[in-house]
Image (spheres, grey):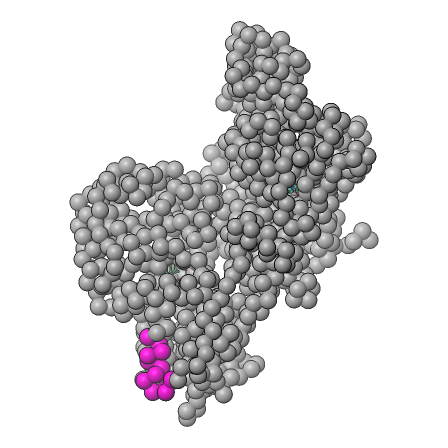
Amino acid sequence: MFDVVIIGSGVVGASIAYELSKYKLNICVVEKENDVSLGASRANSGIIHGGYDCVENSLMAKLNVEGNILVHQICKDLDVPLKNIGSLVIGKNDEDKQVINDLYNRGINNNVKGIKIIDSKQLYQLEPNLNEGFTCALYCESASIISPWELCIAQIECAINNGCKLNLNYEVTEIVAHNNYYTVSNGENSIDTKMIINASGAGSIKIDELLDECDYQCKYVKGEYYLLDKNQSSIVNHVIFQTPNKNGKGILITPTVHNNLLVGPTATNTTSDDTSVSSDGLQIIAKQVNNIYKDINLRENIRNFAGVRVRSLKKDFIIKESTKNKNYFIVAGIASPGLSASVAIAKKVVELVSVNNQLQQKETFINTRKVIRFNELSENEKIDLINKDKNYGRIVCRCENISEGEIINALNGPISISSIDAIKRRCNTGMGRCQGGFCGVKVMEIIAKHQNIAIENITADKKGSYIISNVTKKGV
Amino acid sequence: MYDVIVVGGGPAGLGSAISAKQNGAKKVLIIERDNVLGGILNQCIHNGFGLHYFNEELCGPEYADRFIKMVKENDIEILLDTMVIEISDNKEIVAINNQQGYLKLAAKSIVLAMGCRERAAGAISIPGNRCAGIMSAGSAQYFINKQGYMVGKKVVILGSGDIGLIMARRLVLEGAQVLACVEIMPYSNGLVRNVVQCLNDFDIPLLLSHTITKIIGKNRVEKIIVSKVDENRNVIIGSEIEFDCDTVLLSVGLIPENELSKKANVDIDKRTNGAIVYDNMETSVSGIFSCGNVLHVHDLVDHVTLESLQAGKYAALYAMNQTINSENKTISLKVDANIGYCVPQKVRLTNLNEDKKISFRVKKKFDSCTIIITNANNQEIKINKPYLLPCEMQQVMIKKELFENCDEILISIKEKGE
Ligand SMILES: Cc1cc2nc3c(=O)[nH]c(=O)nc-3n(C[C@H](O)[C@H](O)[C@H](O)COP(=O)(O)OP(=O)(O)OC[C@H]3O[C@@H](n4cnc5c(N)ncnc54)[C@H](O)[C@@H]3O)c2cc1C
Ligand SMILES: Cc1cc2nc3c(=O)[nH]c(=O)nc-3n(C[C@H](O)[C@H](O)[C@H](O)COP(=O)(O)OP(=O)(O)OC[C@H]3O[C@@H](n4cnc5c(N)ncnc54)[C@H](O)[C@@H]3O)c2cc1C
């Protein structure tokens, strides 16, 4: 019997697993995909927002601002890439100025740290490559950029190191409520647990319905992106938002922690699992980007992708214990700024759980994680490392200079993985301009050898994304 | 201290190392990241190499083998499985491997011969799903020819570059169905002989002025939509054709691999994505030379070899202090709007003892036309051509006399009747 089953290993489920694993609890995370962070948590803008954008007194506002502060320590402890580069909402005319003023006031009410309104001179000092004609901006010093999937992976890994279980490829399709426990099942294996936390993102309503729950509605809004080559990243220094107007927020432009430039997202209504990219969406982005920076060249694109936001019609996060099913906790409608708020959402969940359950802190909690990133080391560190382990001397990904040693580390990690993209999320192989054209094959060879599986069984990404269809005739 | 270090052991690297040695360099080293020499030729098991250089038709590995033998006979040092990760402008090379670890090597001169990479799917932004089954033609070539794995059963090829054409035939021979080769331009981007031998002979339709407008598939490609485009390459609504396929191979261009060159502060030509070079294949950094696909994309390996012999020779001469490469007197080679680029981009006055071979590519297709080379004194060379295609690199010899007393040479194309 588990104390807690967490359904979903997006950044929200991962943060909850991390927080709860500090307590003497038997925890199991179940995830339908073959790795963690394959939902909204891998396809977003990667911004830790300041928190001035959220409606005053909402749960979103509170948890965004708290999360923005808490995430720094977690990233330090767990070696997650985060850069505190600050954000700017840039404005042109009086109308924009009014909106920026409103955002500023909201920020102050929401307790956002480090915000101020700046004039055009200050703006162009911060962003010298910005097109001419912008007159003012809301500067938010506390906004950061983060690797969203690494925040997720790191917290799950840490939870596992502290005793948490992770069941991948486990799609919850049945839940039976007993007197004082639940049985969760994927149709094949069942798990008994005292508590359930539904952190299944776009799947939350389906899970609720298994328990005849659900008193909220969600809509699904797709956001599409261009991810540009590293050679574009020096154009932009901060997270750049346009001033929202009657047509919406418009696209944003931001450097990523991996030194690419991200341009997007769009916002179109869609279904919960539609991550396709559309020509209309790409055109919307193309139309806007050079109105902000004329130097950005979309032909330097290395990848397009899309993510699906799950917005509750109540326009706020839903974080509560069910009134019908005791010890069933719902964490739903976690739209943007869900990434920024995730670690605070987890604290909130712990609070809710502890109302009716005695939580006891573990005496020892392993709160460290270290990732070797060969390319970032000094010359002497590189020499030492190769001397210790020759695998660091074999460079596999030529765009990002990733060594075999790093890939083996990922394969030895607490989460059992066997796809090329799982390696990419952990080591950045194939993140560069050739997008794995060169290293994909080599990564496959290393996975096959290390996990002792046939190369035909290695997928690009999720289940079913096979790469090799059959063998050749071998000259016969 | 090496006289010459060659980065990359493909045909360009092999040719330049041999030439450096034969022109007097004593200590020559080739550094190659793969576990064999030969570069991309190792996966090109088809015929058609060496027609110009050897007057023989060889397959890729055979062509490479001839040079690998010469490298061994010429007492050239080789480091395999070794990746060069940095080159400084004072010609120090940092390389790593899993035997010697971290190596710092100094050279009097360096030849850059890192080849090119294929343009990836991102570069062309096809709408639809991000599923598996979309791969560059060269990656498929590696899987099939080197690993013995098939990448799909029903394939559509996007782009009609040579690698795509060669792979169309290869896939059919291995039992896959190739449903079509789709090309956005109104003409093929591959050599005529490849269109005939790889598509026509196998009844594979070549859809010119078409492109893929959507890729559909949950985890693996299931279906694609192909549409016709007008002369401005805008998609024509209503022209959609559906193909049920599990694989899309991309053959949409090659990009010289110059990350290292940039670290060494070598000036890059935006048009070629390769270094700007003088007539002796020397880059803007004195003592660093460049040749082969890292300099500009070649369609024939024979041309790579010839270019590399030049680079190797001058790298050797530089190492032995036999050249004085003063910057002050140079002639620039300019091209008109019909031509994409030319290589070399500059000629040194101090080096006018021989005729110069210039390579260039036209930007679009020309029927019967004239290549005109003019100097500032209005002296001209005219060469008539029945046709010119962007996919076929052109080479012209310019007599040394034409360079005398001028600081600029212009290459232009004139269409018949103009
Ligand atoms: C385009 C876009 C841009 C965004 N930008 C930002 C931003 O810049 N800053 C910010 O703070 N926020 C941003 N967000 C919001 C943020 O990405 C989300 O709030 C956050 O990722 C939600 O995490 P999650 O764990 O709730 O959901 P998910 O990451 O979707 O995780 C849910 C998990 O549950 C699993 N699951 C579902 N059903 C089942 C089942 N039946 N059984 C087992 N497992 C199941 C899924 O496979 C998935 O792994 C953005 C979102 C989008 C879409
Ligand atoms: C997939 C593909 C198929 C082709 N098919 C044909 C064909 O059928 N017929 C034809 O005539 N031409 C073909 N070509 C063109 C062919 O590339 C050239 O004719 C020729 O191979 C180019 O020679 P190169 O030495 O410049 O480059 P390459 O052959 O690419 O060699 C470059 C070498 O440098 C090494 N290298 C690169 N960076 C480093 C580093 N940092 N450290 C150490 N080593 C490094 C690489 O591993 C490689 O071995 C093809 C090209 C490609 C990409």
Q: Residue at x 50, y 47 (%)?
A: A302
Relative depth, front residue between A389 and B250: A389
Q: Is residue A59 above or below residue A475?
A: below
The image position of residue B311, as x and y in percent, is 66, 27
- The residue sitting at 58% across, 14% down in the picture is B349
Q: Is residue B19 left or right of residue B336?
A: right
Q: Is residue B231 visible?
A: yes
Task: Give the camera-side residue of B132 and A382.
Answer: A382
Say whether residue A335 is visible: no
Placement of B397 over or under A421, stated as above or below: above
Q: Quadrant location of residue B375?
A: top right
Residue A28 x, y percent position in the rendering: 49, 79
Q: Which residues are magenta?
A: A348-359
Q: How many numbered discs, if any? A: 0
Q: Main secondary structure of the magenta part?
A: helix
- Residue at 46 percent of width and 62 percent of height: A79
- Residue A285 appears at what percent x and percent y? 38, 47
Tell me the residue at 32%/63% (across/down).
A68
**Extreme residue toward the bottom, this view:** A179
Task: Specify whether A51 is left or right of A37.
Answer: left
A134 magenta-colored = no
Q: Where A231 sits versus A208, above or below?
A: above
Ligand 2 quadrant assignment: top right
Closest to the observer: B4 or A214? B4
Does residue A351 belong to the magenta stretch? yes
User: Is A61 located above or below residue B81 in the figure?
Assistant: below
Please state if B14 lies on the left or on the right of A26 as rendered. Answer: right
